[in-house]
Amino acid sequence: MGYCDWASVDENNRIYHDSEWGIPVHDDRHMFEHLFLECMQCGLSWALMLKKREIFRECFDNFDYDRIAEYGEEDVERILNREGMIKSPRKVNAIINNARCYREIREEYGSFCEYIWTCTGGRTILYEGHEDGEIPVSNGLSDRISRDLKKRGFKYVGPITVYSMMQACGLINDHERDCPRRDMINDNYPTVRLGRDEEIY
């Protein structure tokens, strides 16, 4: 069975690849979890994010953005004192800030998923060349979303981080051509094919 190359790095990567990566997400809590992991990963390895995911879940109320949005200084201290937690006050405060901004988008659009999926017309994008490994670290769409999120007050949401989130949440299908997960997603979810640098609108 063929797989995306990165899926064979270790068992955590394989499980994440086979069960989550690229499957379209339409649940706001789950979407926030992916955004959380991508923001926390900035400057660190993805393997570390998967290794510490349960610690994140414990420290941040199972990624409940409503609860996180209400966190104060005592919560920041609690999180930073948790054994095994990434000791970055800036990132912890950014996550809390992002939860508050996340709620504002929900109030405006009804859900964060509605906001983000509007950017792809509700379909998973299949970019020309990506199935053959010609995958960029960011593109015009991730740059546009990044700029809008930053304007709304989000932190740690550069175009590379946003592109990674879009891959993880199935807005883009970047599984390799021979990876069975690519066909599974294409067969079960609405998709749109675009040229390598083509925009959805």
Image (cartoon, helix red, strand yellow):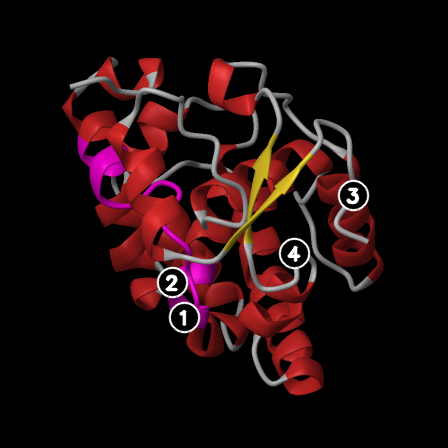
Q: Is residue 82 visible?
A: no
**Mark 3 — residue?**
199
Residue at (79, 53) in percent of width and height: 150
CB atoms at circles 1 and 2 under 8 Å apart?
yes
Q: Position of residue 34 (x, y in %)?
A: 44, 51
Task: Determine whether 29 is above or below 178 in the image.
Answer: below
**Mark 4 — residue?**
120
**Type of the residue with mark 4:** Thr
Task: Determine whether 44 is above or below 173 in the image.
Answer: above
Residue at (33, 49) in percent of width and height: 187
Q: Position of residue 44 (x, y in %)?
A: 48, 24
Q: Which region is colored magenta?
A: 15-31
What separation in Å lies between label 4 and label 1 (alpha carbons)? 16 Å
Question: Mark 4: which secondary structure?
Answer: loop
- Residue 20 belongs to the span the image colors magenta: yes
What separation in Å lies between label 3 and label 2 (alpha carbons)? 26 Å
Whichever of labels 3 and 1 marks the residue nearer the N terminus, that label is 1
Determine which of the numbered discs, if any, sits on residue 30 in the image: 2
CB atoms at circles 3 and 1 under 8 Å apart?
no
**Type of the residue with mark 3:** Glu
Few, some or many residues within 10 Å of mark 2 (<14, 14–19, 20+): some
Task: Determine whether 146 is above or below 118 in the image.
Answer: above
Few, some or many residues within 10 Å of mark 3 (<14, 14–19, 20+): some
Whichever of labels 3 and 4 marks the residue nearer the N terminus, that label is 4
Question: Mark 2: which secondary structure?
Answer: helix
**Type of the residue with mark 1:** Asp
What separation in Å lies between label 3 and label 4 (alpha carbons)? 9 Å
Which marked residue is nearer to the observer: mark 4 or mark 1? 4
Determine which of the numbered discs, if any, sits on residue 27 in the image: 1
